[in-house]
């Protein structure tokens, strides 16, 4: 800190992203990236976009990408908003409509960026406790509030709500904005997108970082009623009119059009999750039922912090959140078959089995 900092900068407690190590040969299972590469068609489109036209600004509306996403999700292009990663889309939503006179609600264990944006943009918020199985109970949100954000599947638990449960949440709250963050929905969750038609207060946010293996490109998007999308555009155009460059637009569009590669990759991750879960359970871990590309697991013999450190010594990187309810757990990303083998070998070594 120094004398040039604003009061706001002094007060912030920024989000801490997962480690991106510079050490080679680490098994990196700490930031929920895809172990498989992006669609070859996306890579080809990005190479083609790296051309003389890079001297020109990109399409500020990302029209082609929004059209491709609209076709993929069965909505109109005017119902699609794109941004520089879903983090940017979520941040804009906090300003555009989650900020209301009454507080924003979200689970006590969830994506740790939500309280950071609330603080940055001056939103009052309240955390709603997950139940003892680490599940969101939509009944617990039945109270007078200004807005709601829920990650579904939730992070870092991986536990999902059904579409019927989201529908009940929306029935309880027809008059406030409800945001469902579906960063991990493609790995077995039920998307709330079909509920958009009947709910002008619902915004669904998704990302290309996980199921489309494009974390390095930074592309996320929102789907919802044109009224909500218009609010997001107003915020975007008061902040950065060109959030997606030409290469990002080209790569993301080609990825969305490559349905076969997308489906195959999701299926491979789901199979890998099943295998990893079985292996972890064999070692005595309790694993929450995951619909994401990671699992949240705890071992009765060792604390999470200790286990994460011991795995790191054996070149396996997992994520640990050192807060009261999450401290016993490790969040472990689904990797390749070889990654899982090395994870399990390291865990066996640590546990002495
Ligand atoms: C629940 C959730 N939402 C959103 C994001 C942001 O993803 P991105 O900004 O890469 O689209 C993440 C990233 O890990 C996440 O876990």
Image (cartoon, grey):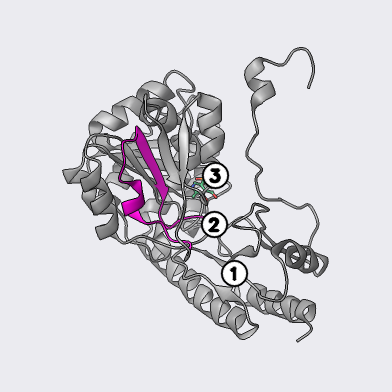
Expressed as whole percent of the image width and height from the top left, the position of residue 328 reads: 65, 64
Is residue 47 a member of the stretch shown in magenta?
A: no
Q: Which badge, 3 or 1, comes first in the chain's sequence?
A: 3
Residue lying at 30% horizontally and 26% vertically, measured from the top left: 230
Q: Does 104 appear above or below 46?
A: above
Classify mark 1: helix, strand or loop: strand
- Viewer-proximal residue among 259 and 109: 109
Expressed as whole percent of the image width and height from the top left, the position of residue 193 reads: 27, 50
- Viewer-proximal residue among 215 and 162: 162
Is residue 149 a member of the stretch shown in magenta?
A: yes
Q: Which badge, 1 or 2, comes first in the chain's sequence?
A: 2
Q: Which badge, 2 or 3, comes first in the chain's sequence?
A: 2
Q: Does 276 appear above or below 327?
A: below
Whether the residue under disc 2 has CB within 8 Å of ligand 1: yes
Principal secondary structure, stretch drawn in magenta: loop
> Which labelled disc corresponds to residue 217?
3
Residue lying at 78% horizontally and 76% vertically, measured from the top left: 350
Can residue 209 be seen in the rendering of this structure? yes
């Amino acid at each position: 800190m120094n004398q040039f900092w604003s009061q706001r900068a002094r007060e912030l407690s920024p989000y801490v992203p997962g480690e991106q190590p510079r050490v080679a040969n680490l098994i990196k299972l700490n930031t929920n990236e895809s172990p498989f590469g992006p669609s070859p068609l996306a890579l080809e489109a990005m190479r083609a976009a790296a051309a003389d036209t890079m001297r020109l600004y990109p399409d500020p509306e990302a029209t082609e990408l929004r059209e491709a996403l609209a076709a993929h999700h069965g909505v109109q292009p005017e119902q699609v908003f794109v941004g520089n990663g879903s983090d940017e889309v979520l941040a804009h939503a906090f300003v555009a409509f989650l900020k209301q006179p009454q507080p924003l609600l979200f689970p006590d264990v969830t994506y740790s960026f939500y309280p950071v944006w609330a603080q940055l943009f001056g939103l009052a918020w309240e955390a709603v406790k997950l139940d003892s199985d680490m599940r969101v109970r939509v009944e617990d949100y039945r109270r007078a509030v200004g807005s709601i954000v829920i990650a579904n599947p939730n992070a870092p638990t991986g536990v999902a709500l059904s579409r019927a449960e989201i529908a009940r949440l929306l029935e309880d709250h027809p008059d406030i904005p409800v945001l469902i963050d579906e960063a991990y929905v493609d790995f077995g969750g039920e998307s709330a997108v079909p509920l958009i038609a009947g709910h002008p207060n619902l915004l669904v946010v998704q990302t290309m970082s996980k199921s489309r293996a494009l974390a390095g490109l930074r592309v996320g998007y929102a789907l919802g009623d044109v009224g909500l999308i218009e609010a997001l555009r107003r915020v975007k155009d008061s902040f950065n009119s060109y959030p997606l460059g030409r290469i990002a637009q080209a790569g993301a569009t080609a990825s969305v059009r490559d349905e076969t590669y997308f489906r195959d990759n999701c299926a491979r991750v789901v199979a890998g999750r099943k295998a990893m879960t079985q292996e972890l359970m064999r070692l005595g871990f309790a694993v929450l039922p995951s619909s994401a590309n990671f699992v949240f697991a705890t071992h009765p013999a060792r604390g999470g912090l200790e286990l994460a450190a011991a795995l790191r010594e054996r070149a396996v990187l997992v994520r640990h959140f050192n807060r009261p309810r999450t401290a016993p757990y490790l969040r472990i990303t689904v990797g390749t078959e070889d990654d899982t083998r090395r994870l399990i070998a390291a865990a066996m070594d640590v546990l002495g089995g």
